[in-house]
Amino acid sequence: MARDEELKKRWDTLIKKLSLRFADGAPLDLDGIIYLIGVQELGQLHRRFKKDEKLNLMHIAICRLLTPYGYYALDYVDEEGWPHYQIKEELPNLKAGEQSILMKEAIVNYFLEQKFID
């Protein structure tokens, strides 16, 4: 199977599983999945977040997702448990479609690593 086809198959499987678990079957979008990853990475699963904290959660997720690609590295975790990342390499200028593919690939790889999907 071609790499793009495999990514699409895994992405569709992931969307179905996450949507059933977290959105009563309504399809989650990319931002929703990034938010879920941020909550997972923070590890504070059972609390409500303020608007600015939700943006920070998405930032945590993006940094974590792009760490294996060499763009970020975990720097430290503060006293409240929030991870902080440092930029290792500037992100390349990508078109919107290319950004979407990179993020979907990074998300699929994250959930493969977590053994949530095969």
Image (spheres, helix red, strand yellow):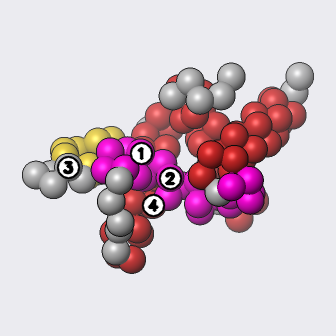
For label 2, the residue is 36
Within 10 Å of the Cα at label 3, are there few (<14), some (14-19), or many (20+) other Cα atoms? Answer: few
Front-most of residues 95 and 44 = 44
Within 10 Å of the Cα at label 1, are there few (<14), some (14-19), or many (20+) other Cα atoms? Answer: some
Q: Which quadrant of the rendered structure holds the C terminus?
A: top right
Which residues lie in the magenta part? 24-45
Q: Give how far apart the Cα atoms at labels 2 and 3 are.
A: 16 Å
For label 3, the residue is 81
Q: Are marks 2 and 3 in contact (CB under 8 Å)?
A: no
Q: Under tag 3, what secondary structure?
A: loop
Q: Under tag 1, what secondary structure?
A: helix
Magenta span includes 28:
yes
Residue at image coords 68%, 60%? 29
Looking at the rendered image, the disc whose residue lies closer to the viewer, 2 or 4, is: 2
Q: Are marks 1 and 4 in contact (CB under 8 Å)?
A: no
Residue 56 image offset from top left, x and y in percent:
36, 65
Q: Are marks 3 and 1 in contact (CB under 8 Å)?
A: no
Q: Give how far apart the Cα atoms at labels 1 and 4 are.
A: 11 Å
Q: Quadrant of residue 23?
A: bottom right
Q: Are marks 2 and 1 in contact (CB under 8 Å)?
A: yes
Front-most of residues 93 and 39 = 39
Query: Is 106 placed left or right of 14 in the picture?
Result: left
Q: Name the kind of residue labelled 2 in the image.
A: Leu
Residue at image coords 87%, 27%? 2
Q: Name the kind of residue labelled 4 in the image.
A: Met
For label 1, the residue is 40
